[in-house]
Image (spheres, rainbow, N blue to C red):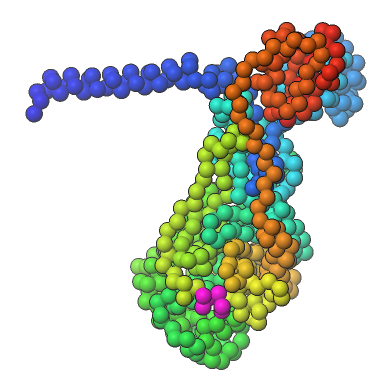
Amino acid sequence: MLPDRKRFSFLFYFLCSLFAILAGRVGYLVFFNDKEIAFKNGERVLRGAVYDRRGIELALSVDSSTIGIYPANIYDPNFTAMQLSPYLDISPERIEGLIREKSRYFLLKREIDDATASRIMEMALPGVRREREYKRVYPHGSLAASLVGFTGMDDDKALSGLEYYYNRELMTPTESDPTHGANLHLTLDGLIQFKLEKALGKRFEETGAKRAVGLLMELHTGRILAMASFPSFDPNRYAAFEEISHTNWALRHVYEPGSTMKIFLASVLLNENLIRPNEKFDCPGYVEYGKTRIKCTQVHGKVNLEEILQYSCNAGIIKAASRIPNEVLYEYMKRFRFAEKTGLLPNESVGYLPSLNKWTPTTPMFLAIGQGISVTPIQLVASAASVVNGGRFVTPRVVSHVTDVYGEVLHEYKSEEAPVGIREYSTERLLKAMTRVVREGTGKNAYIQEYSIAGKTGTGQKAVSGRGYQDGLWSASFLGFFPAEKPRIVGLILFDEPKGSSHTGGGLAAPVFKEVVENIIPIIEQGERTVDIRLPKLDRKPSILKSDRVPDLSGKSKREVIELLSPSGIPYKLHGSGFCYEQEPAPGSQLGGKRVDVFFQ
């Protein structure tokens, strides 16, 4: 054992070494790291764009301007106000009042286009200043709004959605361009998303539902193809919409799944060989345990497992599921990841599954019909995928990869998998039963003659805390798989508290699912077709311009333009970010000492 003095000396030198390493790292970041130097000097970083899997822009940043006022430098407030008013859509009286009221510099109007700002500055009004900034734009308005999210008026202030959770990636400069953040590429298909939102949104308005959710996911990869949530909003004008519309209910809504839970109980029965082929169970229209009585929609008589799912028979599934030992059923529920987050995004809600030591004799009965358990839409879809994808719980994902401005992949996201243990034989029988649900049963409103769909309806009364289940409060859903023979996609349509006479999963959600599938079949069969343009990275060497003509700068990056024009002493001004799409004077024009304006996007 070391003497105390030696032990103290060893600890002292060890701590000194750690401090030296830390000090060196801080010194490097502050004085030598290009990214940190850019932030230290106050250089703005252009926020990266968000693309769908086809390269469609869902969010991007563009150059914008702010008009500011120095009241002390304005000699004639009335004249200044009259000149500014037509360009800013603010009354002259309002502008003049602000000028006279304030003593310090203030921002009069933000996020105006550069052309308007240029015309204002050309008037050379004393005390009027223009500030450059970036404006976040969502070209397709409300498309996937609750998923993508939005930023504040400053595009580096992310407020919700993927904009918020991937803010670091979007705002971190890349080695290839220290002024541009990384671009985010989603698994989302903009065309499928549009079809889903169109069909779901129309029915949402017609029913006056409290909320509606639509989800489509590749069941083998976990890639989210579409995720819709209503009420929705336009992120370009997010402040004009109620806060409830900003919420992504596919991740946040917690509800009792109702009869869609029957497919999980059926899969356990088949997988554990607890039910014989064509074995019948009697449905007298109800099932009782002590004073507990659970009703069925009607008297179904003798029904086998396929018929139980076909008619959504409560009595039949309860009697069949009574053969599953509680420990076995609970273990399967945990494998399906009920009452757990899927891992898609951090802001997921968590459903509820009572721990095994809190189960009563009626717990499995209610569990069989989707009561006493709660889920989120994304959790139900991910769990349902594991029933038919070969018995694997695949973590859903919506971000595919991150690239720099040249299209080079900086990071790729992969799904994680965990075995559930559903055998192929069990899957085949379950798919056969769910196909019958759509062809002849409660889900027949989702039936498409030329394209087979397997699925299960869900209709459940909603409970109110302290008051139990309430008449008139319903949750209507349809959980589907297609094509039924070898499913590639799992989807969910859900309406929460729809109004009117149609409130069942079969009557309300199934027709929407059918409409969506009919509209996206050509897209699915065509497959992914990206329109991304990947530019090769080249070793750039400064070149000196020897001609007296304006060079053609189209397609060049900022760095290439600077390397071309700077050594020649040609005056120039750069506008925007990205690659040159326009220039003045035009290529080939006589230079004659003119300034060259280069516009990028």
Say left or right for 75 vs 173: right
Kindly indicate the quadrant of the structure image that contains residue 337.
bottom left
Is 430 within the magenta? Answer: yes
The location of residue 567, given as percent across then percent down, is 68, 9
Kindly indicate the quadrant of the structure image that contains residue 283.
bottom right
* Of the pair 453 and 65, the residue shown nearer to us: 453
* Of the pair 167 and 461, the residue shown nearer to us: 167
The residues colored magenta run: 428-433
Depicted 364 relative to depicted 287: above or below: above
Residue visible at 67% across and 21% down? 560
**In this orientation, does residue 138 appear?**
yes
Depicted 259 relative to depicted 400: above or below: below
Is 407 within the magenta? Answer: no
The location of residue 15, given as percent across then percent down, is 27, 22
Residue visible at 55% across and 74% down? 431
**Which secondary structure type mostly characterizes the magenta part of the structure?**
helix
* Of the pair 274 and 6, the residue shown nearer to us: 274
The location of residue 172, given as percent across then percent down, is 56, 30
The quarter of the rendered structure image containing the C terminus is top right
